[in-house]
Amino acid sequence: MKTRAVLLTIVLGAAMLPAQDRLTSKAPLTPAQLAMQRAQAVIDKNSKDYEAYNALALALARRARETSDPALYTRGEQALQASFAISPGNYDGKRIEIWLLLGKHEFAAALKAAKPLNQRMPDDVMVWGFLTDANVELGNYAAAEDAANWMLKLRPGNLPALTRAAYLRELFGDVEGAEDLMKMALDSTPPGEVEDRAWITTQLAHLKLATGKTQAAEELLQQALAMFPGYHYALGNLAKVRIQQHRYDDAVSLLQQRYSAGPHAENLYDLASALELAGRNREAAKAFSEFERKSVAESMQADNSNHELILYYADHAKDPAQALAVAQREYSRRQDVFTIDCYAWALHVNGKDAEAKQVLDVALSVGIQDARLFRHAGVIAEANGDVAKARAYSRQALEVEGFTTTVAASK
């Protein structure tokens, strides 16, 4: 183990903000950039101020959400190492450490780290929030709901609790309740927190889009992009709007913009899918090939694109064995409804329809109203010989998307 002095020496250089992050541009700084600058200014004056390193780590985590750049989490970890070298195990640093674990999708590790911190300080609302987040991503929905309720009991109407409660409402099928809570969250967010407001507005648009209210979703997304130009979450959702409007080339343009800003495998998968819808098959094939290369390279990591990789192998590459191998690996890590859906679909394309139904029923029992899950459930029901259930699931998929026409389950 490195000594405290050696660790501090290593991290002091790494935690310093690169030149491009300092006040060298006339462009308005985002809330996270401002927080980064303030923390760095304190460090420049006093390199032994562990709280300043905590502030820098937190600001870097916020900047990671603004930009979708995972390298910022690594820099946040480096800043925390400096904090712990000065003040080992300090409470605020341990809190931020959990935040970074969640950002890197290390959900089991985040849950393990949050439990003792929750026991140490049971009235800390944000630690209850971390317990909510980790349990949601792992599929422990009862525990997540309990943690979110504690947040609201400790501090009624607090912003972190509202957004988490809204997401749980959505997962449980109460989209209207989720929307009400998100509106409350937006009303509670200060005007200067432009990224937070853009994120919440994008979530409201997502809820509109999830129920087929395309025009309302588009209006909200335009508002989000006005608040935070080029915002990657808003671009991705606006592309979904364009796809529902059958404006596929416009969707491609939006997704190309998002991929240029955040060249992640999952973003490339969405771009390849849009290219295919636009009839640009040669470009789509090239994009899917590059997606597979990038996705396979990160498949064993916690922060991966395994959901997209499973669907790629199942629906595009027609490689059911690979789809199931990836799905089994991801399912062993987490059992949230979306992982369960991908696992069930992989079982289906491998002819394991009885098992696929059993697995997918667990996700559907949560109450989520998701068109893709209903479509998959319809196909799996039909494969199991239950035509009536297949048609019912197909109707539900159409209703979720805002259509009323009844059709039989797709084959």
Image: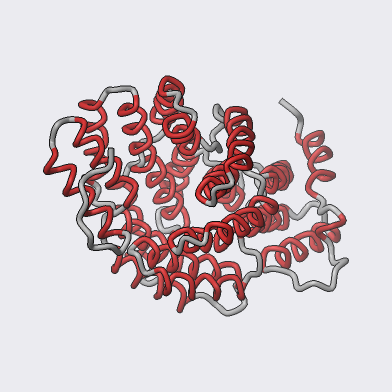
Instruction: Write the residue at 58% across / 58% down.
Output: 249
Q: Quadrant of the N terminus?
A: top right
Instruction: Write the residue at 44% across / 70% down.
Output: 217
Q: Across the whole image, how many numbered discs are drawn on residues?
A: 0
| Most foreground residue, 357 or 10 | 357
Spot occupied by residue 296 in the image (x, y as percentages of width and height) = 58, 28
Spot occupied by residue 10 in the image (x, y as percentages of width and height) = 82, 37
| Most foreground residue, 186 or 363 | 363
Looking at the rendering, which quadrant does residue 230 occupy? bottom right
Q: Going by the image, does 285 lie left or right of 359? A: right
Residue that lies at the very extreme toward the top in this rendered image: 321
Q: Quadrant of the C terminus?
A: top left
Looking at the picture, the colour scheme in use is secondary structure
The answer to whether residue 252 of the structure is visible from this angle is yes
Eyeballing the image, is 285 above or below 119?
above
The answer to whether residue 87 of the structure is visible from this angle is no
Spot occupied by residue 332 in the image (x, y as percentages of width and height) = 39, 27
